[in-house]
Image (cartoon, rainbow, N blue to C red):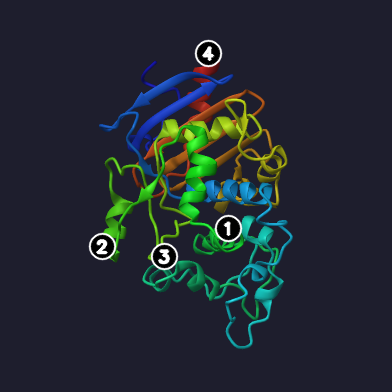
Amino acid sequence: MKSLKNYSSTNDVNICQIVAYKENELCIEEYYNGFGKEDTMNVMSVTKSVTSLLIGIAIDKGYIKSVDDYVMDYFKDYTPKRGEKKIHEIRIKDLLTMTAPTKGKSEPWKKVCTSNDWTYTTLDILGGRNGVIGEFKYRTLVVQILLGIIRNSANVNVLDFANEYLFNPLGIVSRINANCTNANEQMAYVMNKKNHGKVWFLDPTGMPTAGWGLSLSAYEMAQIGLMVLNKGVYNNKRIVSENWINLIGKSYSSLDYLFGNQDYGYLWWLPNRTSDVIAAIGDGGNVIYVNYSKHIVVAVTGYFKPMVFDRIKYIEENIVKAIESK
């Protein structure tokens, strides 16, 4: 099936791959812009949703007791800045729901991305004297702290943890270091419109970036989506608990037009404000779309293109309708 043009979008020009399943059966597999099945794209903030799954796995394995744990309980070797008190009140669930307070009006990308350990540098911006816990504030950098919690609680290399407990069981080839060592290489990685390889952007300590930087193919994203659709089970093997899958798709914030009138779960979006449909969404329109009521999974990759805000609509008005009409 080709030419999915039922819904017209000026933003579909950057699509590289589309893979879709209905009732666990592959029904759409299309490639554009010179991409093939094995090629990958930096899927940007879809990485956040993968981070959420890794937290669930760490909880299942007992490394993390609960989302109600205080973040600072996992960083005993970190000393907050003088006068900082709010950081001691922040729980893991506040990071998962983007309701943890941070210092400053914008994120200090240069400070973090030129540091030796992104996790501990990010801790410096968490909290704040005027910070309010519970207010939604979309921040990419603070998600890094969640992978630091896995590293410290399980005493593991987080990339190895992800490969062993999430990617490999889903048939996804192990990720390796993207080997970007300076700002120019970081920017080139983000802007690259061609195959990225089987990589994940790592900081100087070998820690994966938690909020962006994972490269996946649409086929690989679709396998993640199938596992989520089937409540944590893939090929009859449980990857993450059903309870965690239910938690990531629960609404914790109901957002306005600035965020597409969507709700937000544990680093997963609820595009229609119900748990019937959840999605991992990244810049450029990279999406894992899971529709429980229709038993449909759609994965789309796209090279970086700013202001692509209609990919969910494109999926629902185009791809889902095409699947249902078959």
Q: Which kind of residue does numbered mark 3 sit on?
A: Thr
Helix, strand or loop at label 1? It is helix
In the rendering, at what x and y percent does residue 322 appear?
49, 18
In the rendering, at what x and y percent does residue 315 appear?
49, 30
Frontmost residue, 169 versus 288? 169
On residue 184, which mark appears? Answer: 2
Residue sitting at 67 percent across and 26 percent down? 293
Residue bearing mark 3:
205
Number of residues whose C-alpha sits closer than 10 Å to that of mark 3, classed few (under 14), some (14–19) or many (20 or more): few
Helix, strand or loop at label 3? It is loop
Q: Quadrant of residue 7?
A: top left
Frontmost residue, 46 versus 176? 176
In the rendering, at what x and y percent does residue 238 appear?
63, 34
Q: Is residue 47 left or right of residue 35?
A: right
Residue at mark 1 to residue at mark 2: CA–CA distance:
29 Å
Q: Is residue 164 left or right of residue 149?
A: left
Residue bearing mark 1:
150
Number of residues whose C-alpha sits closer than 10 Å to that of mark 2, classed few (under 14), some (14–19) or many (20 or more): few
Residue bearing mark 4:
325
